[in-house]
Amino acid sequence: DAGVIQSPRHEVTEMGQEVTLRCKPISGHNSLFWYRQTMMRGLELLIYFNNNVPIDDSGMPEDRFSAKMPNASFSTLKIQPSEPRDSAVYFCASSLKDTYNSPLHFGNGTRLTVT
Amino acid sequence: AQKITQTQPGMFVQEKEAVTLDCTYDTSDPSYGLFWYKQPSSGEMIFLIYQGSYDQQNATEGRYSLNFQKARKSANLVISASQLGDSAMYFCAMRSDTGGFKTIFGAGTRLFVKA
């Protein structure tokens, strides 16, 4: 039973470059979440989708960040242009239902370093 | 406003002893779920246990139990018979309708298990 799959596991890029993070949720899950984790700010919700539709993107830091979910099995988080302060671990998570009793299942994360 | 508070940045416990990790929450929503996640040094986020706001009994999953005190708005995680592999970061989280079914996380507690 495959879990949430994220790629790449590690990304090192230079300031100003475009970065694309990818996520495949668990099959049958209808909600998908992107989180960012840093030492200073902890786990922050960036955006979440329900049935491929963005529901809340209030956590997206600025216009440099964008996310898409073209179908139920794939989502991307893009940063363009990237900045050193974007360095963090980015997690994708999915849940079976969009209800309060449905736990999140996380991918292994993408560690992004922007130099 | 929805909020999760974990007041213990770090905890030490002797191997084979029990330990309690504290979590308090704030919500005005009658329907909510409380979750605990484990993040070992390898970085993945592992779902441990769930407690629903309407559940009459405390949740248990193996060596994990949740001490749910609704009136006090607390949802403490109890780990019995600690093992060296329990050394990790532990996050308390909440999901509710009022929060738009977003899952919010506390700052986490780092647990160290001593041999």
Image (cartoon, coloured by chain):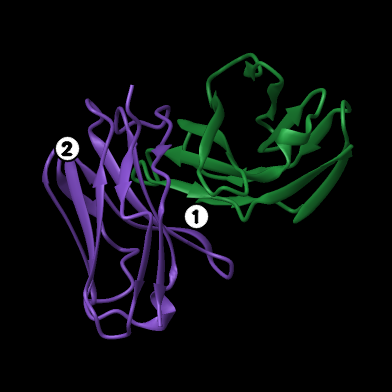
A14 left or right, relative to A69: right
The amino acid pointed to by label 2 is Ser
Tell me if mark 1 has few (under 14), some (14-19) or many (20+) residues whose alpha carbon lies within 10 angstroms of its own.
few
**Quadrant of residue A86 within the rendered picture:** bottom left
**Secondary structure of the residue carrying numbered label 1:** loop
Residue at x-position 29% and y-position 79%: A82
**Secondary structure of the residue carrying numbered label 2:** loop
Residue A102 drawn above or below residue A62: above
Q: Quickly name the residue at label 1.
A: B1
Tell me if mark 2 has few (under 14), some (14-19) or many (20+) residues whose alpha carbon lies within 10 angstroms of its own.
some
A98 left or right, relative to B15: left
- What separation in Å lies between label 2 and label 1 (alpha carbons)? 33 Å
What label sits on residue A52 in the rendered view?
A: none
The amino acid pointed to by label 1 is Ala
Chain A representation colour:
purple
Q: Quickly name the residue at label 2.
A: A73
Identify by letter the chain in green. Answer: B
Look at the image and tell me in which quarter the N terminus of chain A lies. Answer: top left
